[in-house]
Amino acid sequence: MSKETKKKKLALHWKILIGMGLGVLFSLILLSTSWGASMTSVKVKGEEFPISNAELFVRNWVKPFGNMFINALKLIAVPLILGSLIKGVSDLKDISKLSKMGLRTILTYLATTIIAVSIGLLIVNLVQPGKTITEETRENLIENYSGEAGKRISSAEEQKESGPLRALEDLIPDNIFSAATDNGNMLQVIVFAIFFGVGLILIPVDKSAPVKAFFDGFNEVILKLIDLIMLVAPIGVFALMAGLVVESPSQDLFVALLWYAISVVIGLLLMILVYVMLVWIFTKRSPKFFLNGISPAQLLAFSTSSSAATLPVTMERVEEHLGVKEEVTSFVLPIGATINMDGTSLYQAVAAIFIAQAFGMDLDLYAQLGIIVTATLASIGSAAVPGAGMVMLVIVLAQAGIPEAGLALIFAIDRPLDMLRTTVNVTGDASVSMLIAKSVGKLGDPSVKDWDDHYKKEVI
Ligand code: ASP
């Protein structure tokens, strides 16, 4: 490639940002035209519902492209986990290395989540956003959103009804093919892949070599598919953002919830600062290097609100742009995407206290400590899909004795906050994978072409 064409090539995160900006602009312009703003109706199950022309147009002609993009990302999530985790685990060569890395990963994830909940509690107690909600606004919100809140409460109820060991029991799939048919069963696929990888370590090398070679090649194919999908990322995020803008609820309710949203946003920003500092202190990689490397995954997390859909890109960025060896990314990141949700836990803490404040309840220190425990567990249990954090919030509310109907209060603004917390969730996974890589000597310099050699040098 000549120097000039190289110069003209825009970095991926800029292309994604431009796509997002144009998507928002497109819908805003459409909504401001008299045709776009005028109402029409759609028939759903024989019933007519009013809808603006703009929303109908975007729903029919723009959003499908966004859905196709998300589907493509989700499509490769299961093969990616299977391929890379089996290869990653078997590359570790002995079981003690695996258990060492496993323990460190889980403990670090737990530590970052507890930091996140604590930051959330601190901010919400300082800002006290719930105190700004008037009686009238509260009733207004509850009236508007109680139906939606009810749906979340009943899906949380289903989770609650199961016994205390249910989560553990669910880790072991009874059939790998059925587990692999549902992206919600990612943890089961992870367990199978680790188990398979362990088996591969334990058999003689002449038998394991062809199986490993197969997964090596398989992995390469999947990584190439991610590259191909990312070529259309700017179009995908354009469509997703355009869809979000036309579907967002009325602005007045947004304003009423401004202080609550600001509290969550301050907390999330602080959390990003914590990651950057951790990476800087423990791996000596600068904030610019870290944020530049991970930004396309962050933007994708923002547009899709799903850590699971973002996982393929997170893995690619952390490996190829942050210099973490595949043995670490393939293990740490899929687990992180399913259990490490710092943004979600922070949001759950803020939301729980906000609702309590709005209902005039004062939670003492003991109750707030309880929230640290439940929000940590609830975030671990949240699926890596849009809106999952809100379903699990019901459990945090119930444990703390806060009215679950309060969910209706925060509904109007949940989607934008979901986008932001998912961004933090993904950033958290990436930073922890760097810390783990450093601690086991698997962090290299991605700018060195043959970085396998470089990495050997660094380790030696
Ligand atoms: N959407 C979040 C994620 O995928 C989960 C949540 O709703 O908080 O990470």
Image (cartoon, rainbow, N blue to C red):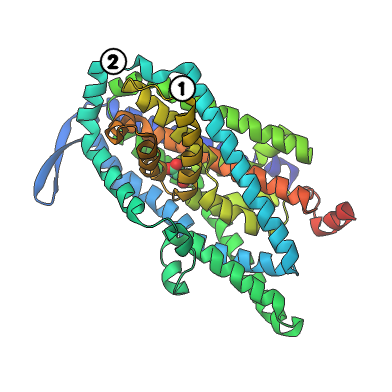
Q: Is residue 197 left or right of residue 54?
A: right
Q: Is residue 188 left or right of residue 110?
A: left
Residue furthest out toward the front: 366
Residue 134: give its label. Answer: 2
Task: Locate the C terminus and report the quarter of the image it occupies.
Answer: bottom right
Callout 1 secondary element: helix
Nearest the eye: 408 or 236: 408
Tell me if label 1 and label 2 are in contact, CB under 8 Å.
Answer: no
Which residue is under mark 1?
262
Camera-side mark, 1 or 2? 2
Which three-letter amino acid code belongs to the residue tagged 2? Thr
Nearest the eye: 190 or 348: 348
For the point 57% across and 40% down, which residue is it? 113
Q: Is residue 382 above or below residue 91?
A: above
Q: Quadrant of ligand 1?
A: top left
For the point 86% across and 54% down, which residue is it? 459
Cα–Cα span, label 1 and label 2:
17 Å
Q: Position of residue 106 (x, y in %)?
A: 62, 51
